[in-house]
Every structure is written in structure tokens, then in C-alpha cells.
Image: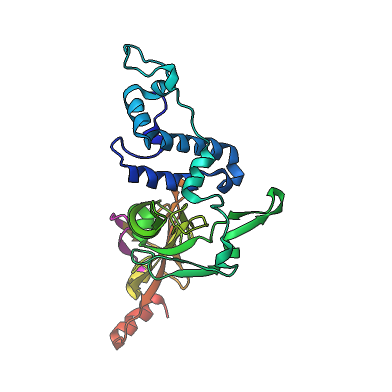
Amino acid sequence: MGVDYYNILKVSRSATDDDLKKSYRRLAMKWHPDKNPNNKKDAEAKFKQISEAYEVLSDPQKRAIYDQYGEEGLKGIPPPGSFSNAPSDGSKFNPRNAEDIFAEFFGSDPFGFSSTNGPGRSMRFNSDGGLFGGFSVNTSDNVFRSYNEGSGGTAQPRKPPPVETMLPCSLEELYSGSTRKMKISRNVTDVYGQSIQESEILTIDVKPGWKNGTKITFPDKGNEQPNQLPADLVFVLDEKPHDIYKRDGNDLLLTYKVSLMEALAGATINLATLDGRNLTIPLTDIVKPGFELVITKEGMPIAKEPRKRGNLRIKFEVKFPSRLTSEQRASLRQVLGG
């Protein structure tokens, strides 16, 4: 069929007129060259494709020809095997100017601000419900517009600051990695230009070794508002405290209690690792003040080098007896030479 107009417009082959309008409105605003000053050439080509797709699919006659004969049929070129029923050269399709179609939807100055609203008009960005409920940002128009004298003073929409929210993760998740599904609710603009709320599931792949404060960004997943670009949503990783282990960079720290006898005569340490293994460690050294036992490669994974790990560092707390009999004291003096 050549060009797939349905795919360009992100609709199914059974799309209704309302479906086409909604999709065109969203994609045209996203890809308009004036909203992509740093990528204007590619945006212009995409914008023209979107406009052409909408023009064909929104016209019942053109859509019927396209569905039956494809792009060649619109160009007036009879497909192989078709005879008198195929469109002739007289029905050759000439796309309208993309800006004309755009203006029919959004007016002649979609990226400007109506003077009737005044320069201090307040815009509000908020989200009700979902993971991002409870925050709002109020600001005036000049935050969301830029004045480009080089382009004749055209007001351009600007992107608001990213919206950040914490993503709590256990130390086990940061050790082995995990997949998180986050439901968000945000405001979008429907085909009539009205703000409606939609929900979406975002997938976050937490990589082994990620550290507290790591940011995961979802571009343009903030609320849609008139005359502004949607904000990015940013999840900030928040490492939850662990009952046994503490993280120090790529190392894991552990405080282990031993009796005075174990500190002097040795012991066997049994630990459950963050990935569920049982670790048996012989303690053969005398535990002195400040003594630390280092077990190599049993720490956290290193995010940028997944095959490498930090160390497990065990510090000891010696439990002294609360009392000794005179016989025990005498035995200790004899053994210790005191």
C-alpha cells in the first residue's frame, strides 16, 4: 500500500471521525515546526505527513479510494489487475497546505496568547489522583512563553519544569533489580479542546546497583495545558532503610554481635544475603576494637559494570558477660597470664 496513513495518524482502520480529529489534534500540536525549533526540518516533514494522513482519512471518498487501492489509487495510477473501477488521472490527489488544515483546528495563532486574557493570566498544572496527586504549580504566562526577536517576535511555548516524585525501593530491589508498574493520571486535551483526565501505566526497570537519588525521566508525561508543552515526569529513587544491611557506595555494611568467648576463640557467622543465599563465614581472627572483616564481591552490584560488585564489610559488637564468679576470674587470669 505504500504510505500507511493509519499508522502515521496512530489510529486503527476502523477509526471514527472523532478518533481522527483527536489523534490529529494531539500529533499536529506535538510535531508543528514552531514547537520544534531545534529539530525543525524533521518536524516539518512529520507535520506534513500527519496533515496529509488526516486529509485523506477524514474525507469519505478519498478514504474509500485509499482503502481499496492504496496510495497509488490516490495518485491516479491504476493498480495491477484493476480495470475501469480504478481511479483515473483526473482524480489525482493533491494534498492541501498543512498549515491550512492546522489553522482550521487551532486558529491562525495557536501558539500565541489572546490579548483578552491579559498578560497576567494564571495557568495551573495539577494532577488529581494517581501517583502524582496532591501537587500543583501556578505561574503566569511569561514562564511558558519566549520572545524570539529573530523570528519577528513570535511567541513560542516553553516547557515547564519537570514534575518530580519519589520512587521508594528496598535494598533487595536495588541488589537484584526489579520491574515496577506505576499508574499515573494526567490531564489531556480532547478533540474539542477540553481538558479531560486519562490514566496510563508506566513501566520502570530498576537496574541492579542503582543508587539513592537516581532519576528516571518520562518525557512529556505531565499535564497538557493550552499554549504550553507538557512537562516531563521524573521519578527519583528513594532507598528504604534495611533492617540488617546498610549501604556505603557499592559496599554493604553489617554490624554483628559476638560473645567475648567468640571474639577471642573464633566463631562461624551465618548470614542471609539480599538475594536469598545463605552465607557461612568463619571468624578465625581475634576481634579487637575497630576490627572489620571484609568479604570481597559480596557487596552491591556496580551499575555501570554489572559483573562487578562491592564488598561486604562486617563490624563487630562484643557482648561482655554481666558478671563472673571468682573461679571464672581465676581461670581467666591463668589463661590470659594476668
Q: Which residue is found at the position 28% from the left and 87% from the top? A: 325
The relative height of residue 55 versus residue 156 in the rendered view (above or below) is above
Question: In terms of depth relative to the viewer, which is nearer, 154 or 83?
Answer: 83
The relative height of residue 315 versus residue 96 in the rendered view (above or below) is below
Question: In terms of depth relative to the viewer, which is nearer, 62 or 200?
Answer: 62
Res. 271 visible in picture: yes
Q: Position of residue 37 (x, y in %)?
A: 61, 46
Would residue 277 be counted in the magenta stretch? yes
Q: Which residue is found at the position 45% from the left and 26% from the top? A: 93
Q: Is residue 74 left or right of residue 146?
A: left
The relative height of residue 40 versus residue 329 in the rendered view (above or below) is above
* The image quarter in which residue 113 lies: bottom right
Q: Is residue 290 left or right of residue 177?
A: right
Q: Position of residue 91 (x, y in %)?
A: 42, 22
* The image quarter in which residue 239 lies: bottom left
Q: Which residues are magenta?
A: 265-279
**Quarter of the image that includes the C terminus:** bottom left
Res. 248 visible in picture: no
| Residue at the extreme front | 90
Colouring scheme applied when the structure was drawn: rainbow
Question: In terms of depth relative to the viewer, which is nearer, 320 or 212?
Answer: 212
Q: Position of residue 195 (x, y in %)?
A: 39, 60
Q: Position of residue 101 (x, y in %)?
A: 48, 41
Q: Which residue is found at the position 46% from the left and 73% from the top? A: 289
Would residue 247 be counted in the magenta stretch? no
**Quarter of the image that includes the N terminus:** top left
Count of numbered circles on the image? 0
